[in-house]
Image (spheres, rainbow, N blue to C red):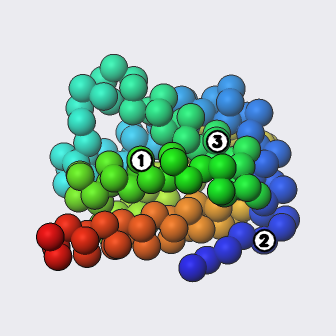
């Protein structure tokens, strides 16, 4: 399981105000990138995309993560909801690199290179992969329980 450096933690926490202001624009841009892959797009509820519900929900989750990156225990219920939803929709470990490849450039696209510097994106990459490892492990457990049932 990957961890995050104290420096990256501080950078991620410092981005919370920008995420609060621009989070939906970031997640909307991320989904536009992600949905260039039709197989991944098919996994998503189109109505939730069109209504803006999914980008808003993800923006809220990313903001909560930024604010609590040093207190992950505060996110237990939210992580559990994500895990359940991911298992329901068939999310697998191989999907996570696609999300990273869509999210990180979307942060730069929306915030601009002056704010979303290489250092900021590197910190978010660390944060993303730490959370991805947590989700992947929890999802594997749920898939195993489902297969055993």
Query: What residue did someone put label 3 on?
Result: 64
* 3D distance between C-alphas at marks 2 and 3: 19 Å
Tell me if residue 28 comes above or below residue 9 in the rendering. Answer: above
Query: What residue did someone put label 1 on?
Result: 81
Viewer can see residue 118 = no
Q: Describe residue 137's horizontal placement relative to residue 105 as left or right.
A: left
Residue at left 35%, top 72%? Answer: 141
Residue at left 51%, top 46%? Answer: 78
Instruction: Identify which residue, 37 or 1, lies in the foreground.
Output: 1
Residue at left 82%, top 45%? Answer: 14
* 3D distance between C-alphas at marks 2 and 1: 26 Å
Q: Which circle's residue, 2 or 1, is located before the other in the chain?
A: 2
**Quarter of the figure with residue 144:** bottom left
Closer to viewer: mark 1 or mark 3: 1
Tell me if residue 16 comes above or below residue 39 in the rendering. Answer: above
Circle 2 residues within 10 Å: few <14, some 14–19, many ≥20: few
Which quadrant would the N terminus be assigned to in this image?
A: bottom right
């Amino acid at each position: 399981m990957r961890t995050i450096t104290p420096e990256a933690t501080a950078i991620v926490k410092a981005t919370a105000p920008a995420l609060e202001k621009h989070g939906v624009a970031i997640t909307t841009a991320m989904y536009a990138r992600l949905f260039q892959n039709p197989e991944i797009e098919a996994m998503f509820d189109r109505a939730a995309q069109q209504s803006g519900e999914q980008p808003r929900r993800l923006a809220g989750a990313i903001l909560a993560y930024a604010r609590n990156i040093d207190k992950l225990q505060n996110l237990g219920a939210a992580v559990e909801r994500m895990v359940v939803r991911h298992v329901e929709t068939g999310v697998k470990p191989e999907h996570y690199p696609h999300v990273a490849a869509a999210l990180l450039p979307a942060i730069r696209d929306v915030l601009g290179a002056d704010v979303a510097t290489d250092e900021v994106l590197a910190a978010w990459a660390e944060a993303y992969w730490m959370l991805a490892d947590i989700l992947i492990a929890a999802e594997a457990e749920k898939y195993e329980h489902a297969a055993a049932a």
